[in-house]
Image: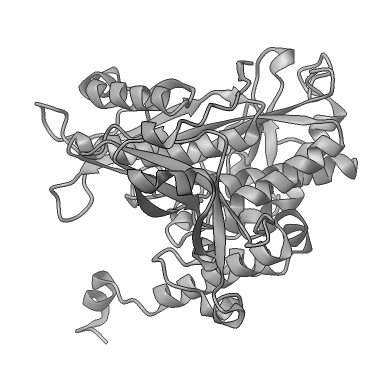
Amino acid sequence: MKRVSAKPEPTPAAADVPRSVRAVVCDINGIFRAKRVPARLARKALDGKLKMPLSILFVDVWGNDVIASGHVLDSGDRDGVLRPIERGPLDLEWLDRPSSLLLCSMYTDRGEPFPADPRHALARVLARYREQGLTPVCATELEFYLHDLDSEEISPPSRPGGPKLSANSVYSLQDLDGFESFLSDVYAACRRLGIQAEEAISENGCGQFEINLCHTDDVLRAADDAQLFKYLVKGVAARHGLGATFMAKPYGGEAGSGMHVHFSLLDADGRNVFSDGTAQGSPVLRAAVAGLLDALPASTLVFAPHFNSYRRLAPNSHAPTRATWGYENRTVAIRIPDGPDAARRIEHRVAGADSNPYLVLAAMLGAALDGIEGKRTPPAPEAGNAYESEAERLPASWEQALAAFAESASQRAVLGPLLTDVYAAAKRQEIDVFARQLSVFEVTTYLDVV
């Protein structure tokens, strides 16, 4: 298994920073919230003295305050402080003007990590692993669609100098060749931002691609990289006159976009504790699988956070619908890939590409550790079509997922009470907004016939 051990990068002096700096923090929806800082004031951002409302972390997907959370007006909507992570400013060369991005975490005015920051939630889970003498090693696989920016509705792009894409073509060499300039610029941007990207493929959908990021034993960095990758893909696509989306299901009849996560665990001596010399893996691996399966119904809201997410979790779609596991089986939720014994690992296949990488990794790793600590035993692995399994079904709708999440003591234990409460409140607010919307299809269906 290829692994990248990340080292902190030096923070440049303010004089070395381009014309502006974007100080950013990731909210619960996986959306960057930012302040633009002129270069002459960059030292303030680099020194961790910028302020931003704490509530910015749990606005809804449209950026509206979630008043019902009880943590906005009732607290006076207090400011927090943005502190840069160790990577320092990252050059954004796809913008028209030289600029840098400064990835930050949120702290209170007393210098304490703000518990509703998704990055801090992941850090808390990783601290539990350190207490057990274990180090997770993670990698993400992100799928996305390119689309035509000139169309009023989302539609496939045209190959540069060629026709509009009109058919699915999984693993298509022609599509890789046709978008070589875009893909090369994505890899170049990854290198500049310190993101270790591996192979790219043309995926099932029309204009859909997948790029894998390398395994790393710095899981916070893995989450940072996934979040930054989504940002840079959109930026590079725009420079090529294209749109890029990580929606879970941008086309009703096409394949959805997922964020599969591969992970293993190392002990203090660097040995993979999922490995025991057999193809089945160790008892520790199976205990982790049991923990993941037990948590799936309650954690689905993290892996499928939006209204559109549930269009992806459909039978016979290569996206899971039941709390199942198996060896070399892509119809299950938790897959154990084949491969060398030293690379024995778990692939978590539930999360959509639209999910928040920090929360996905926190929920996933927290559930696995619960299973390991409890020495749980999973049911028998699925050998065939897991869509026909009798295993528990994942929530089929946003409303069902919210109810399971909000009532779950395990989610509160893993993510923390504040983050769990504000996340649930934000999703309730979003569900209410969607419930009030009438689609054109709904109106035309009923207008003259009822």
Residue at 56% of width from left, 57% of height from top? Answer: 81
- Of the 4 image quadrants, the one containing the C terminus is bottom left
Residue 191 shows in the view? yes
Residue 256: quarter of image: top left
Q: Is residue 38 left or right of residue 406?
A: left
Residue at 22% of width from left, 83% of height from top? Answer: 447
Residue 323 shows in the view? no
Q: Is residue 73 above or below residue 346?
A: below
Q: Is residue 201 above or below residue 17?
A: above
Residue at 61% of width from left, 48% of height from top? Answer: 119
Q: Is residue 242 left or right of residue 324?
A: left
> How are the colours assigned in the image?
one colour
Q: Is residue 127 left or right of residue 335?
A: right
Provide residue 342's location: percent of width, then percent of height. Answer: 73, 14
Residue nearer the viewer, 271 or 382: 271
- Of the 4 image quadrants, the one containing the N terminus is top right
Provide residue 171's location: percent of width, then percent of height. Answer: 36, 23
Provide residue 215's location: percent of width, then percent of height. Answer: 60, 24
